[in-house]
Amino acid sequence: MRTFTAVLYREEDMYIAECPEVGTVSQGRTVEEAVANLKEATELYLEEFPLEDGRRPIITTFEVAEGARA
């Protein structure tokens, strides 16, 4: 078993779930459904494209001044 990160966003009536370590994305009407769908998508992806041992991205945070435009 491996542990991955799920980042969720709310868009209208759906939750978008993303796994930054793998790059998989899914959605659901609830947080639980979105995470369950993300788990399934990630498992299917990893069956086809296994991760190399010991290779994991670095995940961090950073600040941006308020009012900054993307």
Image (cartoon, rainbow, N blue to C red):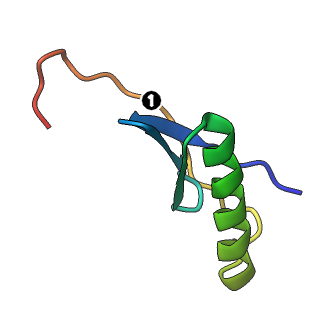
The residue lying at 65 percent from left, 56 percent from top is 37
- Residue 32 is drawn in which quadrant? top right
State left or right for residue 61 relative to residue 7. Answer: left
Residue lying furthest bottom in this view? 48
- Where is residue 34? Give x, y as percent: 60, 46
Question: With 20 as the anchor, is 70 left or right in this view?
Answer: left
**Residue at the top extreme, as displayed:** 66
Mark 1: few/some/many CA within 10 Å (<14, 14-19, 20+): few
Position above or below: 20 against 11: below
Q: Residue at x 50, y 34 (%)?
A: 60
How many marks overall? Answer: 1
In the image, residue 68 lies at what x, y percent?
Answer: 12, 25
Q: Nearer the viewer, residue 6 or 58?
A: 6
Identify the residue at horizontal 71%, vertical 56% (top origin): 39
Q: Name the residue that disc number 1 marks.
A: 61
| Rendered location of residue 52, percent (x, y) | 71, 73
Which residue is found at the position 78% from the left and 48% from the top? 3
**Vertical comparison of 51 with 26: above or below:** below
Q: Give the structural element (helix, strand or loop) at label 1.
A: loop
Question: Where 35 falls versus 1 (above or below)?
Answer: above
Quarter of the C terminus within the rendering: top left
Image-quadrant location for residue 44: bottom right
Q: Is residue 3 left or right of residue 64?
A: right
For the N terminus, the quadrant is: bottom right
Q: Which of the 4 quarters of the picture holds residue 26?
A: bottom right
> Which residue type carries mark 1?
Thr
Residue 54 in the image, given as x and y percentages of width and height: 74, 62
Q: Nearer the viewer, residue 60 or 47?
A: 47
Q: In the figure, 39 relative to 68: above or below?
A: below
